[in-house]
């Protein structure tokens, strides 16, 4: 669930689309859902969890909610990224985790931690494994390494 002032949602929608991209509340809702689907990620036990049935409740305080599809019974690792408001300076997002058999835990996602957190479950406790985006950086470096390695092999074979 994302909850913020309607003006914050309007600012993000206007920033990522052209101003006036929507004429009706329904069109605005569709743009919010599109941005939500683009900026929010949940990975549990190394499997991407689909966010389904997103809904937007408009008001002075606007809320976006979605269901998680096919959540595993046992959670070993949990990665979440909510970058909906990443373009706003000094943004913060409160993440509250509740899962059966685990204590409720609160985290703040912001620009410092790239709006993400990587956790593992150890001894029935949430343990922060990474809060500085190295999870995503490692994926990117791995992809770069594969591309450079493939290119190097192709060049060597050519000569």
Image: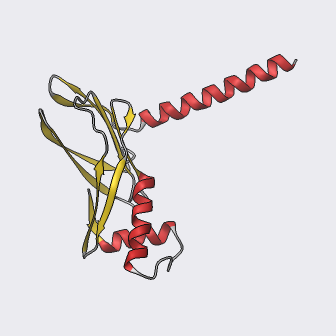
Give the tally of numbered discs.
0
The residue shown at (50%, 32%) is 139
Observer-nearest of 88 and 52: 52
Q: Please provide percent x and percent y for residue 16.
A: 50, 66
Tell me which residue sits at (68%, 27%) in the image.
148
Q: How is the image coloured?
A: secondary structure
Does 140 sit above or below residue 63?
above
Q: Classify the position of the N terminus by image quarter.
A: bottom left
Q: Please, which residue is most extreme toward the right here?
A: 159
- Report which quarter residue 23 is drawn in: bottom left
Residue drawn at 28 percent across, 54 percent down: 93
Please indicate, yes or no, whether residue 4 appears anywhere in the rendered image.
Answer: yes
Q: Tell me the quadrant of the picture where the C terminus can be found.
A: top right
Q: Quadrant of residue 61?
A: bottom left
Farthest bottom residue?
Answer: 23
125 relative to 30 in the view: left or right: left
Please state the horizontal and vertical placement of residue 67, each as a whole percent of the image. Answer: 28, 51
Q: Is 104 displayed left or right of 30 in the figure?
A: left
Residue 77 position within the rendered picture, expressed as x and y whole percent measured from the top left: 30, 30
Indicate the quadrant where residue 117 lies. top left
- In this rendering, the answer to whether 86 lies above or below 61 is above
Depth check: give the residue in front, 70 or 92: 70
Residue 88 seen in render: no
Q: Position of residue 65 (x, y in %)?
A: 28, 58
């Amino acid at each position: 669930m994302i909850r913020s002032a309607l003006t914050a949602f309007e600012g993000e929608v206007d920033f990522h689309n052209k101003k006036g991209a929507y004429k009706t509340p329904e069109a605005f809702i569709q743009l919010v859902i599109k941005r939500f689907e683009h900026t929010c990620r949940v990975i549990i036990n190394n499997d991407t969890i689909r966010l389904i049935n997103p809904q937007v409740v408009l008001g002075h305080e606007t809320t976006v909610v979605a269901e998680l599809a096919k959540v595993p019974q046992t959670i070993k690792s949990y990665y979440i990224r909510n970058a909906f408001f990443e373009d706003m300076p000094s943004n913060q997002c409160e993440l509250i985790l509740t899962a059966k058999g685990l204590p409720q835990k609160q985290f703040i996602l912001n620009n410092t931690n790239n709006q993400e957190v990587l956790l593992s479950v150890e001894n029935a406790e949430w343990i922060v494994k990474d809060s500085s985006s190295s999870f995503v950086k490692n994926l990117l470096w791995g992809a770069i390494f594969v591309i450079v390695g493939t290119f190097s092999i192709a060049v060597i074979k050519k000569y």
